[in-house]
Image (tube, grey):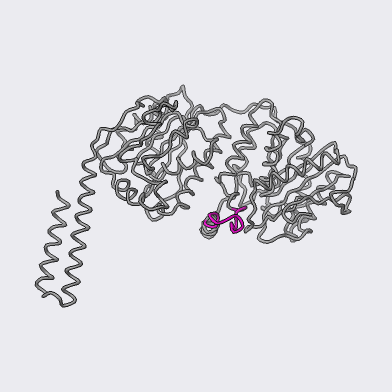
Amino acid sequence: MSTTASLTTSVSGEEHSPGESVVTETLIVFVRGLHPWNPRPSAYAAIEQLLREQLPGSEFHSFNYRGTYYSTEDPGHLADRLEREIGELIAKKTPQRVYLVGHSFGALLLRQAVVNNAQQPEGGRWLDKVEKLILLAGANRGFHPYHGGLEFLAMVARAFQRLPSWFRIGRLSVMGLRGSVWVTQLRMAWVKHSVDPDSVLPFTVQIRGARDSLVGPHDSRDISTSRRSVELVIDGVGHKDIALLRPENSDKVRTQLACKLKEALAATPQTADFPPGADHVIFLIHGIRDFAEWHEDLGETIVQIAGPGQRVEIVPISYGYFSALQFLFPTARRRCARTFLDRYVQYFARFPGARFSAVAHSNGTYALAWALRQNPFIRLENIFLAGSVLPRSFRWEHLEAQVNYVSNDCGNRDWPVGVLCWLLSWFPPYWRELGTAGVFGFKGDAVRGSSRGTRKFVSNNQYREGGHSVALESKRHDEIARFLLTGAGWTAQGLSHRSRPLRRWFLRGIGVSLVIGFGFLFCWIAIANLAPPFTMGLTLGLTLLLICFLLLI
C-alpha cells in the first residue's frame, strides 16, 4: 500500500486488499477532507456505516492520502492518481452502479478526477458507471481564511511555495484556497462541461449544514449551473457534523443525514428552465489607498447608457483598504488577484453565455493582469486601465486570445506610478511585475502590431492633466461606459509626449534629496565640533531655502 495515496477496500465490514477479487453490484468511493493531523482509520467509520445502510450490499473504498494542513502534496497529482485508481477498481469489479462521495476538500479532489476522466477518449471513461456524485459539505469554492490569524498562516504557507517541492509546507492547503489557480481552473472546467449539451458529468448532490462556517449557500454556484445537480441543506449542522466527526451529537445528526442521503439517492435532474441572465458582466476593481468611491457612480452610468435593451451586471470587486505598505508585498497583491478570480468564476457560473469586461485602477491593474496570465480560461472583452502599475513592456501579445481591447489612460502627474513604481522596478522582486505604464504607456507588439500577426488591441490614451485617479473622474464616466459596453472610442494611438510635469517632479526629487544630504553632512560636521555653530545655522537655513526653491520651480 502506498503511503501517499491508495484505496482501501471494505466489503460487508471485512477488510480486503485491493488485489482480491470481490464481486459487487454497488461500489462506493469515499474521499475524506483535510485535518490538522493524519486522522485514525476509524474517524470516518460512522459515515461509512451510514452509507452502507443506505446502499445495502455495497463495497466501500476509501482514498488515503496525506491530507493534512501542512501536507506538501499537489492536489492535481492526487486527483490524477484518484482517477486512475477508480478506473482500475471499476475495471476489476465491474460494478453496476458507482457512487462517489467526498467530504470537504475531498469533494474538490473527486471533482478534479471526474473532470480528468471526462476529457479522456470514450474508451477510457468510467463516468458512464457513476450513478451520483455526493458531496458532503464540499468546499467547491475553496477555503477562505475568515479571520486575520488564518490569513497570516496562509501568507506564511505561500512563502514556503517558493522553496523546492519537498519543503513546500502547506502546499495542499494553499492550492485549495479560494481563488487559487487550481481551484479556479477546476471550477471553470466544470462549468464548461456543464453547459455542454453532450456533457458526461454525473448527477451531483451537495449536502451541507446550515451552520457551516466554511461552506456557504453561494459556494456551489459552479455546480448549480447544470440541471443535473441539487443542493440539500440540514438545519443546525456544521462542517464537521456532516461527516459525523463529532461524537457528542452524532446520533442527532445521523438521523438528519440519513434522510438527506435517502433524498440524494432518489434525486432526479431538474426540468425547469433557468431565469434569463445578464448579457454583459462588468467588473470594477479598485487600487491602493482607495475606498472605491467611484464604483457606485461609474456603475450607475454604465447601466444608464446601456439602457433597457441590454442586461448589464455590475460587479464591484473590493478587497478592503489596501495601503502602500501592503503594495510592496507580492503575496498581498496576489491576494487581490485571487479575490477577482473567485468572483469571476462565480459570475461565469451564473451567466456562462455573457460577455465580460473590466475596469481596473492602480493595484487592480496588477491583480487583473496576474489573473489573466495565470488562468487561460479567463476571457475579457474590453479592459479599461487607470493609473496602471504594470511595466511598459508587459507582454499583452501573449494574452491576445483572452482580451479584445485594452484602453490605458495615463496621468501626467501620477507620482505613485511615476516615482514609487519606477523606483521599485529597479529591484529584482519587482522589475518584471511593476512599472510606469500608467504614466508613459505600454509598448510592444500589442500596441503597434507586428509582422508575426499580432493585432493592435492595446491603446495608450493621451495624457490627462492630473494625478493617480484622474482617469476615473466623474466627467469621464460616460466615455468609459461606452468603451466597456461597445468598444467605442478605442483607437490604436500613441501618446502625445507631455510628460514634462512628471519629469520636472523627478528633477525636483533628485535636487531635494541632494540638498538634504548635503545639509545633514554639514550638520554632522558642525555637531562634531569641526565647524562653528554659525556655520551649522547658515547651512540649515540655506538648505530650507533651496528645498522651497526646488519645490516651486
Single out the residue that lies furthest toward the bottom. Answer: 529
**Residue sitting at x 46%, y 32%:** 357
* Image quadrant in which the N terminus is located: bottom right
Residue 320 shown left or right of residue 242 in the figure? left
Residue 164 inside the magenta-drawn segment: yes
Q: Quadrant of residue 543?
A: bottom left
Q: Is residue 44 above or below residue 89?
A: below
Nearest to the observer: residue 21 or residue 299: 21
Query: Which residue is outermost to the front?
Result: 451
Residue 539 placement (x, y as % from top left): 13, 66
At which x and y percent is residue 257? Answer: 75, 48
The picture places residue 240, in percent across and down from the top left corner, at 69, 55
Depth check, front residue: 221 or 535: 535
Magenta part of the chain = 159-173
Q: In this view, does 202 lie to the left or right of 524?
A: right
Which picture quadrant has residue 118?
A: top right
Task: Kindly identify the residue that appears in the image at 33 percent across and 36 percent down.
Answer: 409
